[in-house]
């Protein structure tokens, strides 16, 4: 079959022929892949930098996708850690890690949406007990995952969602999909800190997609601006587009009643993530989320990989 194949971590995948191992075990299914999205996680799989990377090559990138099984059913699937990912004409999946989709849904839309949506769905359902009426800050709300997080937080019961992001157009659009307050991360550090602190004095949960230089600055601003520093605040670390590290002075952890947790592969057991797939897939197919996806041919994978990543989620179609 044809697939995107990585033979060296310092080179983008190439469109090549490669053999797919036969499906083995009663829960294994071979699917015709219809759509596989190019998430951040997929890039770090392909360049060997993801914390779950084993260093084995060659590999086919792709952690999830939408395919059609031998009985003609559409399935969204998540692959286990494997060298045989979803950016291929076919994929061997474990049926227990898949959700059957209604006929007629657009495979590209589902493939684009599930991973970004899963980030906040899992964080809010599995890393904390989200109290009805909670107040949530989405830090990095203009990305694919952040935009979904604003909407999913509302769906899961948040009463007030503050969206903080950089791109002015995408930030403004979030007011139309449930954000109650918008904070621009553009501007002088002092102005950003003041605006963010002022908007989050009573926030209960932070969904942090940025980390790095941004969280380094705004974390103490949010902590010290709290109206009641004894009010519990859970800061959930989810993504790191602004950098992989911060320096954490001990005083920050004493300055307010804050707990810092992470959400992702590892901090939530795979069986718990997999158990959430059908519910989230149903929620997305039943909702009218605006999913900004662009379908591209799998055969063009090498060129697509080298192109600058735009705001729209690229989905490869065999
Ligand atoms: N843990 C999980 O379960 C999980 C699941 C999915 C994704 N993630 C992670 O979540 C992060 C976001 O994923 P995504 O799919 O939403 O990516 P995305 O669509 O590429 O969005 C990233 C956004 O980050 C913003 N950004 C980058 N640098 C910034 C900075 N210095 N300050 C403010 N904003 C900045 C950009 O905003 P502007 O357009 O406004 O510039 C961009 O829209 C990634 O790190 C990804 O790996 C984690």
Image (cartoon, rainbow, N blue to C red):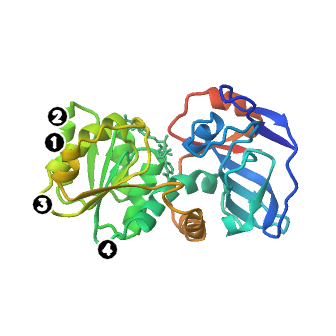
> Which mark sits nearer the N-terminus, 3 or 1?
1
Above or below 18: residue 30? below
Mark 4 Cβ and ligand 1 under 8 Å apart: no
Name the quadrant of the N terminus.
top right
Q: CA distance from mark 3 to mark 2?
A: 22 Å
Q: Are marks 2 and 4 in contact (CB under 8 Å)?
A: no
> Which mark sits nearer the N-terminus, 2 or 4?
4
Identify residue for label 2. 190
Kindly identify which numbered label has been placed on residue 194.
Answer: 1
Q: Nearer the viewer, residue 42 or 156?
A: 42
Mark 1 Cβ and ligand 1 under 8 Å apart: no
Identify residue for label 4. 132
Identify residue for label 3. 228
Q: Position of residue 104 (x, y in %)?
A: 69, 64
Q: CA distance from mark 1 to mark 2?
A: 6 Å
x 42%, y 56%: residue: 149
């Amino acid at each position: 079959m044809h697939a995107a194949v990585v033979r060296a971590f310092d080179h983008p995948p190439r469109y090549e022929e490669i053999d797919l191992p036969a499906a083995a075990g009663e829960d294994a299914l071979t699917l015709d892949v219809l759509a596989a999205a190019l998430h951040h996680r997929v890039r770090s799989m392909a360049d060997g930098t993801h914390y779950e990377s084993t260093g084995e090559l060659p590999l086919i990138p792709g952690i999830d996708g939408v395919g059609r099984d031998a009985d003609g059913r559409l399935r969204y699937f998540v692959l286990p850690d494997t060298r045989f990912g979803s950016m291929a004409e076919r994929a061997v999946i474990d049926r227990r890690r898949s959700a059957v989709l209604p006929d007629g849904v657009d495979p590209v839309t589902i493939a684009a949406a599930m991973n970004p949506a899963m980030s906040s769905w899992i964080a809010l359902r599995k890393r904390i007990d989200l109290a009805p009426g909670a107040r949530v800050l989405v830090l990095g709300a203009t990305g694919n995952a952040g935009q979904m997080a604003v909407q999913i937080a509302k769906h899961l019961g948040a009463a007030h969602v503050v969206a903080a992001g950089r791109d002015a157009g995408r930030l403004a659009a979030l007011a139309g999909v449930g954000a109650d307050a918008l904070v621009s991360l553009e501007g002088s550090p002092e102005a950003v800190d003041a605006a963010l602190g002022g908007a989050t004095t009573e926030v209960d949960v932070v969904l942090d997609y940025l980390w790095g230089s941004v969280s380094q600055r705004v974390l103490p601003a949010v902590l010290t601006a709290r109206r009641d520093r004894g009010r519990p605040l859970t800061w959930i670390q989810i993504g790191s587009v602004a950098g992989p590290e911060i320096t954490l002075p001990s005083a920050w952890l004493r300055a307010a009643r804050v707990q810092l947790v992470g959400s992702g592969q590892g901090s939530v057991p795979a069986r718990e993530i997999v158990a959430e797939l059908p519910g989230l897939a149903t929620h997305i197919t039943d909702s009218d989320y605006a999913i900004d996806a662009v379908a591209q041919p799998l055969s063009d994978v090498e060129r697509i990989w080298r192109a600058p990543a735009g705001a729209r989620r690229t989905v490869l179609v065999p």
